[in-house]
Amino acid sequence: MAGMALALVVTAPAVAQAKPTKADRNGNTTTVARTSDGRAITNEAIAKEVAAFWTPERMASAVDLDLAKPAGATEAPSGVSKPGGPAGSVAPMQPSVASGDDVGTQLNESAVVGKVYFTTPGGGGASCSASAVGSAKRRLVMTAGHCVHQGAGGQWYSNWQFVPRYRDGARPFGTFVAYTLTARTAWINSSSFDEDMAIAIMHNGGNWGLKVVDTVGGHGLRWNWGYNISLMTALGYPSNLGGGESQYYCQSGTWHAGGQQIRMWCNMTYGSSGGPWLQEYNDANGLGYINSVVSHGDNPGNGQFDGPYFDDDIKSLYDFAEGLSPA
């Protein structure tokens, strides 16, 4: 996908929703999540408006975000491997309520994984993949940086919503609307694919008005586990398989892709952006350890794609988002 532009380029004028951002000294940036008319989504009433905005018709017409590498995207030189610190983990979390979900084997249909929908600065609808991740406050959803912000010279997306285990228009657990969006500053300022990672903090929602991890559970997280993993499972909603209407998976070992990125064999394309790469995926409960997210590839459907290498940067972003999350 080298040389191909992101499907959603920066063409729209800056509307009256200039989104002030805050950055920390550790390379993380955040903004309050907003509606497309610029209102901060800071209470349940506005969150419900966003959920209502995403009608079945709007969701069906949302464009699956391109996972090609746009012109101007940056990465470290191919020969550079970022030094790693000690390996670390956050454990997966089970949901705290019985959902009544009837899915048995969940190899390619984890309740923790879903589609995200958002409005672009031009006013169109778009979608990516994402997954809930376990934390003490139980509100975090992890995806790719380019699924929350356009990158260098661009803007944050609005009307950001997560639908766990979306399938052919069905929302078995309801929907969750973002309260705050976070991403690595290197993505925001430089479109760096080495740090194409993001975490959204979610309002209570879903069918029971609970936190997202209480409702569906959350994957664990791993960082500094090395480039070469013998088996990784990627999950997402690719448009080339099932039209982006259901989850698909691929499994492969991983290897160093150059810069601070890893690569695996997989034929998923557009729409799978932001989907988790999982170590020790358990198809009995749909949980594993996120060790990267789908970022980009070199040719759509050529059988492989890349993700950011999860080192201390993802742990920094995770801690940053958790610290901003309400109890």
Image: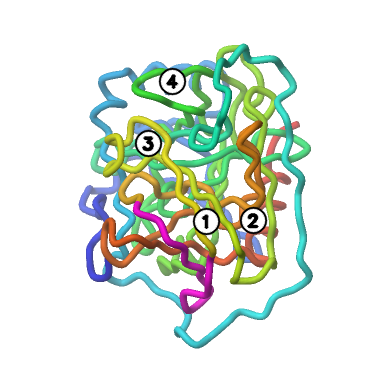
Is residue 298 in the magenta section? no
Q: Residue furthest bottom?
A: 79
Q: CA distance from mark 2 to mark 3?
A: 21 Å
Kindly identify which residue carries mark 2.
Answer: 317
Residue 321 x, y percent position in the rendering: 65, 47
Q: Which mark is residue 118?
A: 3
Pointers 1 and 4 in contact (C-beta within 8 Å)? no
Task: Check contact, mark 2 vs mark 1: CB within 8 A.
Answer: yes
Mark 4, other Cα within 10 Å: few <14 / some 14–19 / many ≥20:
many
* SS category of the residue bearing label 4: helix
Distance from Cα at disc 2 to Cα at disc 1: 9 Å
Query: Is 62 located above or below residue 222 in the figure?
Result: above
Q: Is residue 274 left or right of residue 4?
A: right
The residue singled out by tag 1 in the image is 197
Q: Position of residue 125 (x, y in %)?
A: 28, 35
Question: Dot 1: what SS?
Answer: loop
- Rounded to the nearest whole Å, what is the CA distance between mark 1 and mark 4? 24 Å
Q: Quadrant of residue 243?
A: top left
Which of the two discs, 4 and 2, labels the residue nearer the N terminus?
4
* 324 to 29, vertically: above or below: above
Q: Callout 1: few (<14), some (14-19), or many (20+) C-alpha neighbours within 10 Å?
A: many
Q: Which residues are magenta?
A: 254-267
